[in-house]
Image (tube, rainbow, N blue to C red):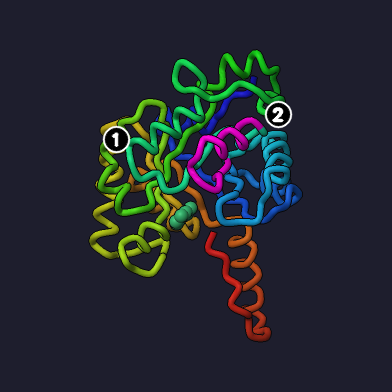
Amino acid sequence: MKTNLVRSKLKRGEPSVGTWLTLPDPIAARLMARTGFDWLTVELEHAPVTIETATQSFAVIAGNGTVPLARPPWNTAENIKRVLDNGAWGVVLPMVNSRAEAEAAVDAARYKPLGNRSVGGQLHAASFDTDPATYYERANDEILVVAMIEHVQAVENADAILSVPGLDAFFIGPNDLTKSMGRKPVFESDDAEFVGALEHLRQLGKKHGVASGIHVADAAAAQRRIAEGFQMIAIASEAGLMLAKAQEAVRALGLGTARPAVAKY
Ligand code: 3PY
Ligand code: MG
C-alpha cells in the first residue's frame, strides 16, 4: 500500500503545498498531477464536479505520484464516505464550526476503533495500489482528515474542535472567514480581527499537535505563511493559475478588454 506522504510530512512538522482542482476534468487533473505539487484537492463544494469525475481525477492524481484530496460539498458522513471509498486519500471538510461537527467528521472518515466508517468499495484500495483487506487494516494511518476553520463560530470553538482525536490538520478558508466577520471575502487582510484569529488558531494547532493550514492567492503569500509556521498551504486553483497567466499575457500585449472572469479558487 502506498504511503500518504502529505500526512507524513505534516506529522513531521514540515510544510506541504498543493492547489485546488475546480474544473470538472480528469485531463486537467492528470496534467496538474505532474507539476510537482504535493497534493491536489478535488473541489466538490463550489464547483460542478460530480463523484464520477472526481473518481477519475483521484485515480490519475494518485497514478502520477501526487496525493489526491477531496473537499466534499459539506461535512456529512455520506459525502465523506463517497469520496474516500472512491479513491481520495483525505478530506478537507468545509465549515467545521463545533466540536460535535469535528467528532462527526472523524467518526465518518476513520474505521473502528477510531470511528465508524462503513466498510465497502473497491476503488479506495486501488487508489492506494493495494487490496481491500490491506486498505481496511491501514487506512486509519494514511487517510488525512482536515477540518476547515472558516467562520467566526469555528474560531470561538477552536480549542474544542482541535482537541478532537483523529484530526490531522485544520485549514483556514480566508474568504468565508472574512465574510463571517462582516467584511468582503478576501485571501489576505491586515484587519486586526483576522490577523488575531490566524495567530490564535496557529497557537491552538501547536497546543493540540494539529497541523495549521490556509488557502492563499500566490506563491509569495505561501512563502510568508510557511515562514509564520503554517504547514498545509493551498495556492489558488488550477483555474486561477491558468487565468492569471493568461491575463498576464493579455496585459503584456495590450490586448482587448478582459471580461470579469477572475477565479479566486
Ligand atoms: C475560503 O476561503 O472560504 C475557502 O473555502 C478556501 O478554500
Ligand atoms: Mg470556504
Instruction: Give the residue number, with chain letter if any, for mark 2.
Output: 123
Tell me what residue is drawn at x 68 percent, y 48 percent. Answer: 50
**Viewed as shown, does residue 69 lie left or right of 154?**
right
Quadrant (top left/top right/bottom left/bottom right) for the N terminus: top right
Quadrant of residue 12 within the rendered picture: top left
Between 251 and 146, which is closer to the camera in this rendering? 146
Furthest residue to the right? 27
The residue identified by callout 1 is: 206
Q: Is residue 53 left or right of residue 169?
A: right
169 inside magenta stretch? no
| Residue sitting at x 70%, y 29% | 123
Neighbourhood count class around disc 1 (C-alpha, 10 Å): few under 14, some 14–19, many 20 upward: few
Asked if labels 1 and 2 touch by Cβ distance under 8 angstroms, the answer is no
**Which structural element holds mark 2?**
helix
Quadrant, the C terminus: bottom right
Earlier residue among tags 2 and 1: 2
Residue type, label 1: Lys
Is ligand 1 closer than 8 angstroms to the Cβ of mark 2? no
Question: Residue 58: x percent and y percent?
Answer: 67, 38
| Residue 138 % position (x, y) | 56, 17
- Single out the mark in the foreground, 2 or 1: 2
User: x, y (%) of residue 153?
Assistant: 30, 50
Q: What is the span of residues highlighted in magenta in the rendered image?
A: 70-85
**Where residue 191 sits: x, y (%)?**
27, 65
Q: Amino acid at mark 2?
A: Leu
Q: Is residue 26 left or right of residue 9?
A: right
Alpha-carbon neighbours of circle 2 within 10 Å: few (<14), some, or many (≥20)? many
142 versus 52 height, above or below: above
